[in-house]
Image (spheres, rainbow, N blue to C red):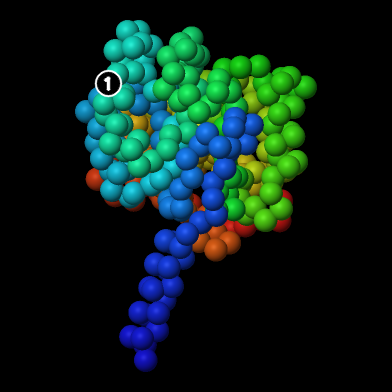
Amino acid sequence: MKFKQIVLVLLAIFIVQFVSAADANISSIGRDSIPKFNNPIYVIYGDTRSDYDAHRRVIKAIERVNPVYVFHTGDFIRGSEVEEQWEIFDEITSHLRKTAKFFPVIGNHEADHEDSFFARFPYLHGEHWYSVDDNKLHFIILDSNSETREDCAQYNWLQNDLENIPADNKFIIVLVHHPLFTTGPHPDDEKGLRETFMPLFEEYGVDVVFSGHNHSYERSFNNGIYYIVSAGGGAPLYEQARSSEYSQLYLAEYNFCKLFRFGDKLIIDVLNPQLELLDEIIIEENTH
């Protein structure tokens, strides 16, 4: 009897993870221009830049978890010799991008080369911020290189987007390049987003905010929201530079985050290129 129960539990987990998800859509940038997928596995990684061998190892590991959505937290390239570096990025990610759709965040290394950036992602139609809905998850992509003050265009768009999330949505996930909380060598809250965006995150029940910029993995927590730095995609790794009451874990390792929804839980597994588990976060649905 116990054996049968174990088999049934494992079968139920398998079915939940692979059951067809609701059609994906993307708001504010043309829903029909984004291909629709049914696989409920999502990957977030970033800061790929200049160590191409490390980036290749991360990509091969990502391919093994079979995502259909890949979100990049910014700094795809170093910046000099722009087209040559984009061509290498295209080569490294070409196989993955045949099966997975990339949803990019603009990093500071792309901010001065927007033409090359948007040429790689024409379905963005030049939009710097946008949102994606899938499987009762709402992803919000922001641009911390653009103006972020209260009542600016991006701030007003963000507030409107948060006010109009589908009623049956379970989790809100934000991606923005510059972290609100970090203990790496780049300044903490470099763009002042705690004063502008964070009150909106808290008011509307954002569950987790992913960033890049400090080349590492870091988990911080403040006022019910996880703040994750996933910036170990190939750029030179940074050691921790200071302590913080908000920081719970800092790892100077190449990494990516694998996300999936399991009922009323959001599971975040942080993996290295060997697919070893570095961290795991389980977020319970809140009432928003």
State left or right for residue 203 relative to residue 66: right
Q: Residue at x 55, y 23 (%)?
A: 125
Q: Against 68, is 120 above or below?
A: above
Asked if residue 181 can be seen in this view, the reply is no
Asked if residue 68 can be seen in this view, the reply is yes
Q: Against 60, is 129 above or below?
A: above
State left or right for residue 12 relative to residue 142: left
Image spot of residue 276 (x, y percent):
29, 49
Q: Which residue lies furthest to the left in this view?
A: 53
Give the structural element (helix, strand or loop) at label 1: helix
Q: Against 270, is 9 above or below?
A: below
Image spot of residue 156 (x, y percent):
74, 27
Q: Against 54, is 256 above or below?
A: below
Q: Which residue lies furthest to the bottom in this view?
A: 1
Q: Quadrant of the N terminus?
A: bottom left
Q: Residue furthest front?
A: 32
Image spot of residue 27 (x, y percent):
62, 36
Q: Which residue is drawn at 58% across and 61% down?
A: 264
Q: In this figure, what is the number of numbered marks?
A: 1
**Residue closer to the observer: 242 or 167:** 167
Q: 10 Å neighbourhood of mark 1: few (<14), some, or many (≥20)? A: some
Q: Mark 1 points at which residue?
A: 88
**Residue closer to the observer: 9 or 102:** 102
State left or right for residue 261 relative to residue 161: left
User: To which quarter of the image does residue 203 belong?
Assistant: top right
**Residue closer to the observer: 100 or 1:** 100
Q: Which amino acid does the dot numbered 1 rest on?
A: Ile
Q: Residue at x 59, y 32 (%)?
A: 30
Image spot of residue 244 (x, y percent):
54, 34
Q: Which residue is drawn at 29% across and 18% down?
A: 87
